[in-house]
Image (spheres, rainbow, N blue to C red):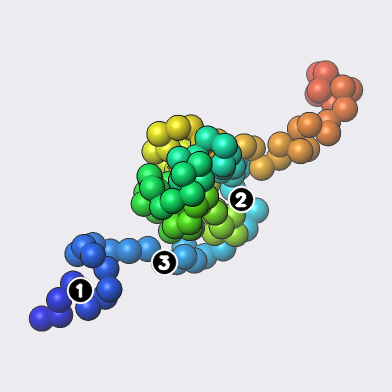
Amino acid sequence: MAGTRECNQDTAMSWPCVGEAGKTGDWRTARPVLDPAKCIAAQKNKLVCMQCWAFCPDSVVSRTAPPQIDLVYCKGCGICVAVCPTNAIEMRPENENETENKTVAEDTCCGC
Ligand code: SF4
Ligand code: SF4
């Protein structure tokens, strides 16, 4: 029987691979944005914390300081936001710029 160490992983568990669920396309409604000023790993310039890397179900957060998020494959689930102990990641709407660029007339239109 094959040992778990043969897959070069430390534990006997399944590991997702980047891109397993395919490219995200344009259906994601919000994307994670990381602020290095609040990130423990970025501030210490070390591979510490790494909760965002450990819990991302799509394995799209790099194990680097600071972590990088591959938005091509990120599904926008928000788990990285939920597990970050310092609130260094926030979800921002994909259409944020559209909202910012909206005119006052569009904002106040009654929809008639
Ligand atoms: S979980 Fe938050 S503080 Fe920890 S490495 Fe990720 S972004 Fe930085
Ligand atoms: S939003 Fe979800 S898929 Fe995207 S980086 Fe965070 S945990 Fe991973």
**Please, which residue is most extreme toward the left here?**
1
- Left or right, 16 with reference to 105: left
Say which amino acid is labelled 3. Answer: Cys
- How far apart are the alpha carbons under marks 3 and 2? 21 Å
Placement of 37 over or under 58, stated as above or below: above
Name the spot of residue 15 as percent of width and height, x first.
32, 64
Say which amino acid is labelled 2. Answer: Trp
* Residue bearing mark 3: 17
Q: Are marks 3 and 1 in contact (CB under 8 Å)?
A: no
* Residue bearing mark 2: 27
At 36% from the left and 51% from the top, the residue drawn is 54
At 49% from the left and 66% from the top, the residue drawn is 19
* Mark 2: secondary structure: loop
Residue depth check, mark 1 versus mark 2: number of the one nearer the observer = 1
Earlier along the polypeptide chain: callout 1 or callout 2? Answer: 1
Earlier along the polypeptide chain: callout 3 or callout 2? Answer: 3
* Residue bearing mark 1: 5
Residue depth check, mark 3 versus mark 2: number of the one nearer the observer = 3
Say which amino acid is labelled 1. Answer: Arg
The front one of 12 and 75 is: 12
- Mark 2 surroundings within 10 Å by alpha-carbon count, few (fewer than 14), some (14 through 19), many (20 or more): few
Quadrant hosting residue 24: bottom right
* Mark 3: secondary structure: loop
- How far apart are the alpha carbons under marks 1 and 2? 38 Å
Earlier along the polypeptide chain: callout 3 or callout 1? Answer: 1
| Label 2 C-beta lies within 8 Å of the nearest ligand 2 atom | no
Name the spot of residue 81 as percent of width and height, x first.
47, 38
Placement of 32 over or under 2, stated as above or below: above
- Left or right, 44 with reference to 68: left
| Label 1 C-beta lies within 8 Å of the nearest ligand 1 atom | no
Residue depth check, mark 3 versus mark 1: number of the one nearer the observer = 1
